[in-house]
Image (cartoon, helix red, strand yellow):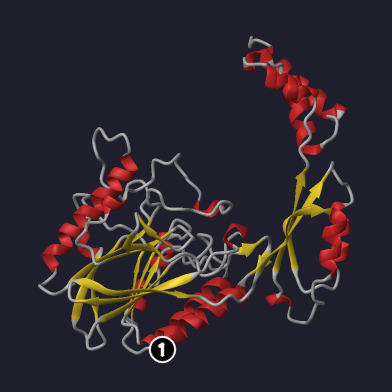
Amino acid sequence: MPLKLLHTADWHLGQLFHEYDRSIEHEAFLNWLVNLLVQKNIDVLLMSGDVFDVSNPSAASTGLYYSFLRKVTTAVPGLQIIITAGNHDSPGRLEAPKMLLEAFNISIVGLVQKNADLSINYDKLILPLKNKTGETKAWCMTIPFLRQGDYPFIAGSKQPYADGVTKIYMDAYAYALTKKKEGQAIIAMGHLHALNAEPSDEDKSERVIMGGVEFVPASTFDDGLAYTALGHIHKAQKVAKKDTIRYAGSPVPMSFSEINYKHQVVYVELEGEMASVIEPIEIPVTVALIRMPAKPKILTEVLLELEQLPEANNDINTAPYLEVNVLLDTVEPTLKYRINKALENKHVRLTRIKPFYKEVENDADKKHQQNTNVNEIKPVEMLHSIYKKKFNDELPEELLNLFNEVIQKLETPEK
């Protein structure tokens, strides 16, 4: 019988979406996940980091988390659960109930444990994966999000983070080889930014932190690994086009850039030392994202479209999140009021209004195009041009005065 795994990540329990509470969405996902684990008779659930959205989660968020663990361990007897910490999690807080949870076959890895000589204790990171009868079928490198001091120092490295992370994975794999027996697979978990992984355009929670030096190459993960279960990037995807290295992605949209994403978990079957099945399973949408209109239109047309939205009902917690795109000639002081008025008693929750301004070429633009040397363009001319182009209006006097004050300070030598 194959060993059945389910890979998920980036739950971000407690996250607010444009200040709206998402408990209903997270609870719906976790209930769906319990049913899927039962349906597939999963042996091991892998959760690759960012259980919570903040390091000090609310009582409601932690309650949701422990309620899920209680439900799933009751619904799927013998299920093994491995949870690693992400960059949003507090490693110590996540590990606090570790000894208690181990009694329910739940392993929490938040911290990289060290030996007395400060070397990494790989024995704590390499865990056996067992089937329902208790037979060890594989080994898992349970590596959490790595902070400074967690990974080995590489002398002379120009990319100490990426090289240090690569080193810890290489050493962990070498250690796992000493544990495995013939016919047993080795898999890995991680919470990191793989090189060339595609993040969301707008989601700051997965943004580049260190100017790109934290990017980890796909070669970090040994070809002998049957599967690598990653977290941190919210768009489900393969890494370096390798079917066996994947981000599961977040279960709910984290920004409007994910409006067309198919959120998923990944089902994996291990046969011997290899993965025989790798199958994404789409997560049903509880609350939709709506962008109206899809492309910006003038305000009068936008207001007409908003009038066509369905009337509000009592179930506000499942009302779609709405983003409104408006094409303007210039700044419209009553924009927010008019849109909010149009949305009164509509079954949506407004998240933001995005104004787009018509581009207008002016004399300053022409002058800039004629100048081949940017040094010939005066800063104040550039400011006038940019403001005119963005808002199709003249630069306000108060902004001009502030700008001139800044220029004057910059040009005044320090005493």
> What is the x, y in percent for residue 373?
62, 14
Residue 205 appears in the rendering? yes
User: On the rendered image, what quadrant is the N terminus found in?
Assistant: bottom left
Residue 73 appears in the rendering? no
Residue appearing at x 44%, y 67% in the figure? 9
Q: Quadrant of residue 4?
A: bottom left
Q: How many marks?
A: 1
* Left-right relation of 369 to 210: right
Q: What secondary structure is found at the residue carrying circle 1?
A: helix
Relative to 241, residue 329 above or below:
above
Residue appearing at x 69%, y 18% in the figure? 370
> What is the x, y in percent for residue 337?
88, 57
Relative to 64, residue 170 above or below:
above
Residue closest to the eye, 414 or 295: 295
Looking at the rendered structure, the kind of residue marked 1 is Gln
> What is the x, y in percent for residue 21?
65, 69
Q: Residues within 10 Å of mark 1 (few under 14, many from 20)?
A: few
> What is the x, y in percent for residue 246?
37, 63
Q: Quadrant of residue 44?
A: bottom left
Report the residue marked by disc 1: 39
Residue closest to the eye, 244 or 6: 244
* Left-right relation of 8 to 171: right
